Amino acid sequence: MADTRTYRHRLPTRLWHWTNALSVIVMLMSGLMILSAHPRLYWGKYGANSDSAWFEISPGHVRVGPLTLPGLGIFGVIKDGRAYTVNPLFTIPTHYDLAGSRQWHFAFAWILVVPGILFLGWTLWGRHKRDLWPTRAEIAPANIAHDISQHARLRFPTGQAATRYNILQKLSYCAVIFLFIPGVILTGITMSPGLNAAWPWLLDLFGGRQSARSIHFICAMGLAAFIIVHLVMVILAGPLNEVRSMISGWYRVPPDPAPEPVAEVTP
């Protein structure tokens, strides 16, 4: 069978993908170190140890509202005889260093923001918007349910369908580009006292600095969940082909399954 290839990812998409992957991972790991300095989250303008928190890390557990969940080896771990709010394997630096983690966080924030603005402009005013924006037929509940069913059965698109983003990809990419990344940027600015002086309306927009901190964490966890699901899908769909296409742009199209032979009926 002939090798069918298509130019799937244009250069701006590939550059933003790898730059964004590096910056988001570093910011997630440094952000977890910052969280460990005060592992409690609140709603409103104020929050301290004596206030009611909706999120709290304790040894071996995480409390989210009324639910107490296991720490899964990430939160509230005991390692080498020491208690850690966040497992050092998932933080930058690996030892407690609030000042160092803030430096990592703010440095890579620029790497996230500047290319992100350029990519967003290219997406909104270029052809890539047509690649990402769902059509009315695609967002029909029946179509979404069908796509979820196919992915759950590990039946991935083949032929020409594999050269386009499916509805689950479109929805997840739009959530990252238009919700999670803008969310972490704006709430990060809101938590800065210096920038509050320039844009005090951000505090009103997010309901106070503590609410902004909570929304910042929720958006960050949304990005973390996207990364995990994205990596799982890449592995299941064929990592060599997927990674190669994000490096070179060229994607080897999986062929459509051969039709089943029709049995001849003897009269």
Image (cartoon, helix red, strand yellow):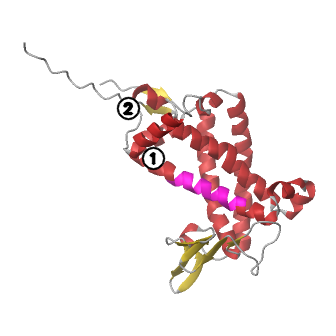
First reached walking from the N terminus: tag 2 or tag 1 = 1
* Residue for badge 1: 233
Please give the name of the residue rendered at 62% of the width and 64% of the height, measured from the top-left corner.
29
Using residue 26 as the reference point, say whether residue 185 is left or right of it: right
Q: Give me the disc on residue 254.
A: 2
Please name the predominant secondary structure of the magenta segment in the image. helix
Image location (x, y in percent) of residue 172: 57, 44
Please give the name of the residue rendered at 31% of the width and 29% of the height, measured from the top-left corner.
257
Residue 230 seen by the camera: yes
Quarter occupied by the C terminus:
top left
| Amino acid type of the residue tagged 2 in the rendering | Pro
Image location (x, y in percent) of residue 219: 66, 55
Quarter occupied by the N terminus:
top left
| Amino acid type of the residue tagged 1 in the rendering | Met
Please give the name of the residue rendered at 48% of the width and 50% of the height, measured from the top-left corner.
231
Highlighted range, magenta: 215-228
Membership of 217 in magenta stretch: yes
Say which element carries label 1.
helix
Viewer-side residue, 50 vs 25: 50
Q: CA distance from mark 2 to mark 1?
A: 15 Å
Residue farthest to the left? 267
Viewer-side residue, 126 vs 256: 256
